[in-house]
Amino acid sequence: MKYLRTATQIIGMISLLWVAAAQSESKSYSIDNQLVDQFVQEMVAQHGFDQGYLEHLFNEVKYKENIIRLMTSPAEAKPWKDYRPILVTQLRTEQGVGFFQEHREALERAEAEFGVPPEIIVAIIGVETRYGRVTGSYRVIDALATLAFDYPKRATFFRKELVEFLLLARSEKVDPRTLMGSYAGAMGYGQFMPSSFRAYAIDFDGDGSKDIWHNATDAIGSVANYFHRHGWKKGQEVTAKATPQGSDFDSLLVKKRRDLKPTHTLAQLIERGFKTDVELPSDQPATAMQLRGEEGDEYWVGLHNFYVITRYNHSALYAMAVYQLSQQILKQQISG
């Protein structure tokens, strides 16, 4: 009987936990929440929103506890040897070739207008959403509200994105409750945050709307515009493998995720023993990088266009995965 009582108690505790979790997940962001009320008042005063509309809207916005958990374990925290196999695969390459062929006209037009190679655009969309197959299952407004009001570590950033999202929904004349995205509020084929949508999304097919959720042509043009506006240089290399010599180069290596902007020239890196495996113009800016590969440490030089890729996601691993996937897609597309 003692065992049965214990088992019953355990079952009861589990039930209570499930109820608590369900109640937590169903919590809405009404103006009873001081942070929400303050946000609503600011949107009314600064952007001319109707207060009643926003109060009704936030009564239907839900807190998502699992989003907080997901924010604490990004894939970019993995070493290169574990990160690369997730994104640079034969399946993703083959799907990329298919996407390339299906949307060749839009890709070639984007290259002509913005100077960004098709394979780079395709690789970005492939890394972000598997070419539109996985664009996110969260309501964007739920994700952004959860992070703006219940994730103090980055609340300032996501509060600004929530502002941008509501402005986006108003300008595009869409119901903000209907737009879906990632757990961080990123949207569409290219996973644009709302601020990026407002700054870089374009109507690339001329139908009067900027639809990055369902329209691959608009997504292609928007990604190309993003890279163009961040300074992509047509015809220049992205990165090159390096063979370091001596030990004087160690202090040149990138130590932090955000220290990716080139601060040396390639000539200066070479002078310190960080020599690329291919010849490149020595006067261009370059960043020395070390990655933990499957067969040991790998050394790379990130050039200006590599830095541009990191403006999409501030990670050397991300930029390297995009570049390597793009080269596999290009190779298979040419040989195909």
Image (cartoon, rainbow, N blue to C red):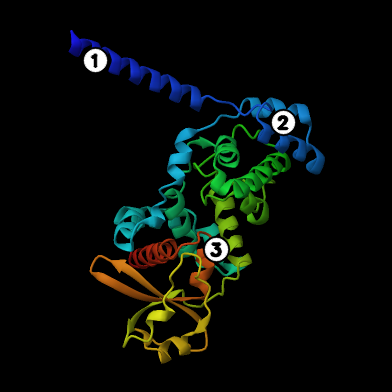
Under tag 3, what secondary structure?
Answer: loop
Under tag 1, what secondary structure?
Answer: helix
The CA span between labels 3 and 1 is: 55 Å
- Give the crowd class for mark 1: few <14, some 14-19, many >=20 residues within 10 Å: few
The CA span between labels 3 and 2 is: 33 Å
Which tag, 2 or 1, sits closer to the chain's start? 1
Under tag 2, what secondary structure?
Answer: helix
> Relative to 30, is 201 above or below?
below
Which tag, 3 or 1, sits closer to the chain's start? 1
* Image x and y of residue 1, in percent: 18, 7
Q: What's under tag 3, amino acid-wise?
A: Arg
Task: Give the total number of marks visible in the rendering.
Answer: 3
Residue at image x 56%, y 44%? 152
Q: Which mark is residue 280?
A: none
* Image x and y of residue 210, in percent: 64, 47
Residue at image x 43%, y 19%? 19
Q: What's under tag 2, amino acid-wise?
A: Leu
Quarter of the rendering occupied by the C terminus? bottom left
Q: Which residue position holds label 2?
A: 54
Q: Which residue position holds label 1?
A: 6
> Relative to 270, is 228 above or below?
above
Q: Which residue position holds label 3?
A: 311
* Image x and y of residue 113, in percent: 62, 66
- Give the crowd class for mark 3: few <14, some 14-19, many >=20 residues within 10 Å: some
